[in-house]
Image (cartoon, coloured by chain):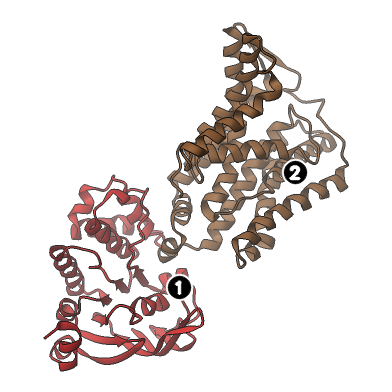
Amino acid sequence: MLKVVKVEVRYGGIPIIHDVSLEVKQGELVAVVGSNGAGKSTLLKTIAGALHPTKGSITFDDVLINRLTTPDIVRLGITYIPEARLIFGPLSVEENLKLGAYIIKDHAVISRNLDFVYDLFPRLKERREQASGTLSGGEQQMLAIGRGLMSNPKLLMLDEPSLGLMPKLVDEMLEAVAKLRTIGMTILLVEQNVFESLEIADRGYVLQTGKTILDGTGKELLNTESIKKAFLGL
Amino acid sequence: METLIDALLQGILMGLLFALVALGLNVIFGVMDIVNFAHGEFLMLGMYTAFFTSLLMGVDPLFALPASALMGVLLGLASYYWFIKYLLRGPAIAQLFGTFGLMLFLRYLAQFLFGIDYRILQKGILIGKSFSVGPFIFDATKIAAGALSLVAFAAVYSFLNKTKTGKALQATALNKEAASYMGIKTDKMNAIAWAIGGGTVGVAGGLLINFYYVYPTVGLLFVMIAFACVALGGFGSIKGVFFAGLLVGILEMMFPVFGQLVGSDFLGPHFKFTVVYLAYFIIVVFRPQGLFGWKK
């Protein structure tokens, strides 16, 4: 479904990512793990069209998307949920969610998606009228994910959904991600929580200073010595 | 007392018009963080449009209003697509000087085309008519200007809050990066903001020509008031700019009357705008985000 081949991305002239390749197949949950500054967010932003690669190719359903703008990529079915969440603080929870469905014209589909999100995160339903800026960090992350689901994405890209959350909420958030996977959503997940994310992932890639250095199934990677040493402190 | 109430009512009518002038400035600022210095010139061209439509085509100035609105929308769109869009590639200072340059260009273009004469419409359904309610006398033109300003303002307000495109504009104003992740095209939103900005101030110009002179630099006074309204109400706040417009209108009308009642020369009409800017100054010092502002 998504193929990233030998991509290089520069930011202010400096290559942040060089030689990254990865693939996400229909229905898979793929995790990209790596330490801070490895280029994980840059990779997702590039796929989302906020940045453009200087080398290599990105194809989605066999369409080259290297040079497309973010709004066009959203229309192809890729939704990016940014690390900083970027919710619209003064607007209510429901207004935020409806904005997530901006590219959908059919009102019936929008209200069906709204029900789906409220089912997944009942707490958002309780707070639907509330200004979203007043939500807790965990609730804001739920809102960011819910808003991303509103556009019926074929591929959901999640950037550090557990960032800044307390341990109990980290588990809850990753459980929600795993639940989306079981209902058939294709997900590309970027995480610093290496262990937890590889546990729920079908496959994983390890990114180090802008390069994919390892890949394999979640279980394989968890049992790799270098990963154990580098990330899990075993 | 009666004169004070009279001044209050007149102030509200002018305030509604001020709010409409300031609205477009604030929509453009809210969505793009750009101050449109040429806003007053849009008003001036809206006034000339109604003036010449009325004079040359023999249409009543009130019915020339759609022409003014159209002129405003076209000016806004042309400015955005042919000029502002290119400025966005440069630093913020380029945008500042860019709209300043647009102001000078339009002002002196108008001077070249229409001369420096002060022109006013003599004929019109409402012009010269007035009616009284109890002890108060109202000019028909000012009632119409106030009422129609309110209608135009309400229309834009409900567009921004009730429609999908309006919500998308708000989202772009709040965070254009996040909005683009929803599939909202920033470029299109910018263009809509300029169309609204130009259209509303065009309508304001078409209303103003019913009781005010038009000349190439007429925009200056009104745009200064609009800047004060935007800062008073809060950058990017639609509600704020409405109440700030009313406040400025009321202050402007009531202050001289108050001076008269006290019997002081110092509080005469020549100081009315001093009071307006003093209020602005006080609010900027004590509440820099404005009365209703949410933008930093």
Colour red maps to chain = A
Asked if one can make out residue B233 in the rendered structure from this viewpoint, the answer is no
Query: Is residue B271 left or right of A167 when viewed as pictured?
Result: right
Q: Residue at x 65, y 18 (%)?
A: B267
Disc 1 + disc 2, Cβ < 8 Å: no
Residue occupied by mark 1: A50
Give the left or right position of residue A211, taking residue B235 as reference. left
Work out how far the residue at label 1 is from the one at label 2, CA to CA, in angstroms: 39 Å
Q: Chain of mark 1?
A: A
Left or right of residue B197: residue B239: left
**Which amino acid type corresponds to the residue marked 1 in the rendered image?**
Ala
- Quadrant location of the C terminus of chain A in the rendered image: bottom left
Quarter of the view holding residue B249: top right
Q: Nearer the viewer, residue B15 or B230?
A: B230
Chain B drawn colour: brown
Residue B12 higher or lower than A150, as above or below: above
- Seen from the viewer's position, the closer of residues B19 and A108 is B19
Place of residue B223 in the rendered image (x, y in percent of width and height, measured from the top left): 67, 40
Q: Residue at x 40, y 78 (%)?
A: A47
Q: Which residue is mark 2?
A: B45
Tell me the residue at 28%/48% (across/down): A134
Picture coordinates of residue B87 (x, y %)?
Answer: 64, 63
Task: Decide: is B291 above or below B264.
Answer: below
Left or right: A76, with B44 as reference point: left
Which quarter shows the N terminus of chain A? bottom left
Residue A13 against residue A181 in the figure, above or below: below
Dot 2 falls on a residue whose secondary structure is helix
Which dot, 1 or 2, sits closer to the camera? Answer: 1
